[in-house]
Amino acid sequence: MKMLVCVSKTPETTTKIQLTADKTDLDKGGMQYIMNPYDEWYALVRALELKEAGGGSVTLLNVGPADNDAVIRKGLAIGADDAIRVNSEGGGSLYIAKQIAAQAAGYDIVFFGKETIDYNGSEVGAMVAELLGTAYVGEASKLEMDGSTATITRDIEGGVEVVEASTPLCLSAAKGMAEQRIPNMRGIMMAKRKPLNVVEPVAAPATTEVASYELPPAKSAVKLVEPENMEELVRLLHEEAKVI
Amino acid sequence: MVLVFAEATNGKFKKAAHEVVTYGAKTAAAMGTECVALTLGDVQDAGDLGRFGASKVYNAADAALANFDSGVFAAAIAGAAQQLGAKVIVLSHNSTGKNLTGRLAARLDAGSAPGVKAVPVIEGDKFTVRKAVFSGKAFADVSILTDTKVISLAGNSIPVEESGSAVGVESISLDLPAPMVKVLSTKRAEGITPLPEAELVVSGGRGLKGPENWGVINDLAEVLGATTACSRPVADSDWRPHHEHVGQTGVAIHPNLYIAAGISGAIQHLAGVNSSKTIVVVNKDPEAPFFKAADYGVVGDLFEVLPRLTEALKKFKSA
Ligand SMILES: Cc1cc2nc3c(=O)[nH]c(=O)nc-3n(C[C@H](O)[C@H](O)[C@H](O)COP(=O)(O)OP(=O)(O)OC[C@H]3O[C@@H](n4cnc5c(N)ncnc54)[C@H](O)[C@@H]3O)c2cc1C
């Protein structure tokens, strides 16, 4: 089975978000980056497990500039066979999806993470499925293969649904699908020699742009309530906060 | 025209459907146009959506819509938008919406804004919507540059408003593809509001010490009618199910009230919960970082404080 795992690069989770003076961009000075956790922990690892069990190949795909190579190499160190980077600064979700769709022909499964932890869009996987005309299953927490048939458990509002679909298909991986793997020394050494092919983007217009950013208003100081006096907390929640 | 996809679960609308119609009606008003709702499959009292501002409700009932397949549903919504001449499509940013927003945007070659929190600001032909980014650490004002626009609304972001009365339901016939996904089984916890939609949430962290101690959380949640949640290490240790894990790598929530007990308030946890309107923190360590993000704090042992709070709430409820 040929598997493609789409990975993105996101700021590290402890990053404190700060804005440029004109608020039109994030202040990226000193920002550290990681592979988007859903892509790394769940999508990539499940693809590797399927390869280990049934053969095939796992290719990473990233749309981004040359600075992204470090994150891609980490994916190769975890165990992917090779990687493709579409050399581009990006241009919004639909732009990215069109770049992915242009590379995705011939793969049985195209994996995504359920969302990126920066823009929280949850939309690129579904876009690629639509562009390729395949099935799409979002927020999948379990994936089993039997030949070309996938049995997938997906998270739905307040529950789970089990569905079946045939390859080729696209899915987004959520918690539960696999366990995070830490790359070992051998993996890191091997990753240096694995192919990372750089291709040029296809033409596609930007469909959205971020006009500006805003930080949430600062919280006013916490009001402490004596641990013996929970009647007072109830009163505050009712009369002051008006949430009960 | 604004077209709202109002989802029904087992034929009935939930709060998310009322929110999304309210949002569509406000968006239509800002654009100087009308808002119509689309319902798919077997739906009871679809015309009731008129109360929240839909001037018309369309329904397509087709065997292919009995189960959810993102390809079929996206074809249905896009087809209706094209037939009716709708330029803005609004849906809920829940699990159904997350399977659809991207497909719709790609199908219509439209710009999209998933998970918005406020009604669009329209200035001339500039159309800008606010969404949370970094799981709530910041907001982005996103301009959609295309003529057709797809927007999904984050749960519990705007209050439901009644602005009209029930309207008639018209059936609409749509060309639908064959489903590519077959549903084998569906399981929903009955009577519990899912976390992304919950107005009241009670959450426990590693301070609970073990799964056997969750009674204090469950009892409090029960008197409040709240949904339960937890920090990541709690879910990772299988003390609680994964779907309860909130934070930057879990569910992002926006309740009116979030009560956190035995949670230190790591930045990744705060990211998913700091859109809560009111935050109450119970922690025995007065230096716990969570107190900086809290509205109300109780410095004390949660095993004493939570039962006391539960009792006080019982008294309040019965008064
Ligand atoms: C990449 C990455 C992503 C992450 N994503 C998330 C995420 O999405 N969500 C998330 O929650 N975490 C996430 N984390 C983990 C996060 O950094 C913290 O480790 C985690 O939130 C801590 O959980 P906790 O507060 O339950 O436990 P702890 O940090 O151990 O805190 C326990 C708290 O309980 C208090 N306590 C103990 N006993 C009592 C008592 N009897 N009464 C009252 N208080 C008591 C203690 O004072 C302490 O403050 C992530 C980490 C990484 C590296």
Image (tube, helix red, strand yellow):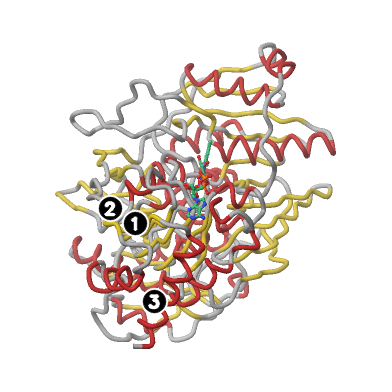
Within 10 Å of disc 3 (Cα), the crowding (few <14, some 14-19, many 20+) is: some
Q: Nearer the viewer, mark 2 or mark 3?
A: 3
Q: Chain of mark 3?
A: B
The dot on residue A222 is 2
- Could you confirm whether marks 1 and 3 are on the same chain? yes
Q: Tell me what residue is drawn at x 49 percent, y 80 percent.
A: B12
The CA distance from mark 2 to mark 1 is: 6 Å
Q: Position of residue A221 (x, y in %)?
A: 24, 50
Q: Secondary structure at mark 2?
A: loop
Q: Chain of mark 2?
A: A
Pointer 1 and pointer 3: residues touching (CB < 8 Å)? no
Q: Secondary structure at mark 3?
A: helix
The three-letter amino acid code for the residue at tag 2 is Val
Within 10 Å of disc 1 (Cα), the crowding (few <14, some 14-19, many 20+) is: many
- Could you confirm whether marks 2 and 1 are on the same chain? no
- Could you confirm whether marks 2 and 3 are on the same chain? no
The three-letter amino acid code for the residue at tag 3 is Ala
Q: Which residue is mark 1?
A: B297
Q: Position of residue A24 (x, y in %)?
A: 24, 33
